[in-house]
Amino acid sequence: MNEIRGLREAQAILGPFCLSEFSTVCELRFYYCKSEAQPAAMLEMVLQSEGKDRDFRMHLRFAGVTGLRLEGFGSALTQIMGFEIADIADRGWEGLFWRIGDYEDDKIEFFCHTAEIAWVKPILP
């Protein structure tokens, strides 16, 4: 079973948590990165938590993104109430190890090669 890069560091800051606690989309950036190894579609997003003693922001980074689908983004504050990152390595899809989605409202879905929690920071009052 794969582990999301940066997960242990996030757990050290937050304690036990569910990704679905980070439901408010603060930033979403999709871009194409040329590298010597291979070009890759990248997606970065910053999500904000709700319901903890303190609110936090989490920066997620995904590489090798394919099949990106978004619904209901852009008109107002976007919330992904059922955000999840699922390990799909056992499916044997070449170069794709993660499925990112929304199990509540189906607002986002894509597949990728790597998933990483780049940072978690508290929101200062």
Image (spheres, rainbow, N blue to C red):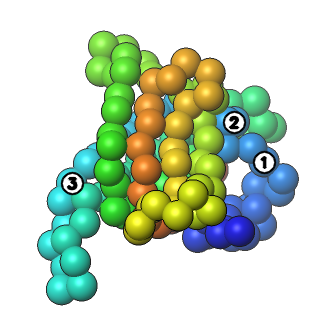
User: Where's the N terminus, which quadrant?
Assistant: bottom right
Question: Which residue is painted at 37% across and 17% down in the image?
Answer: 72
Tags 1 and 2 in contact by the CB under 8 Å rule?
yes
Residue type highlighted by circle 1: Phe
| Residue placed under numbered mark 1 in the picture | 17
Q: Residues within 10 Å of mark 2 (few under 14, many from 20)?
A: some
Give residue 29's position: percent from left, percent from top.
29, 46
Is 114 placed left or right of 125 in the picture?
A: left
**Amino acid type assigned to the residue bearing label 2 in the image:** Glu
Q: How far apart in space, not on screen, are marks 1 and 3 (Cα)?
A: 29 Å
Identify which residue, 101 or 53, lies in the foreground: 101
- The residue depicted at 69 percent of the width and 36 percent of the height is 21
Task: Tell me the amino acid under the disc marked 3.
Answer: Tyr
- Can see residue 123? no
Residue at x 30% of width, y 58% of height:
42
Q: Quadrant of residue 113?
A: bottom left
Check disc 2 and report its element: helix, strand or loop: helix
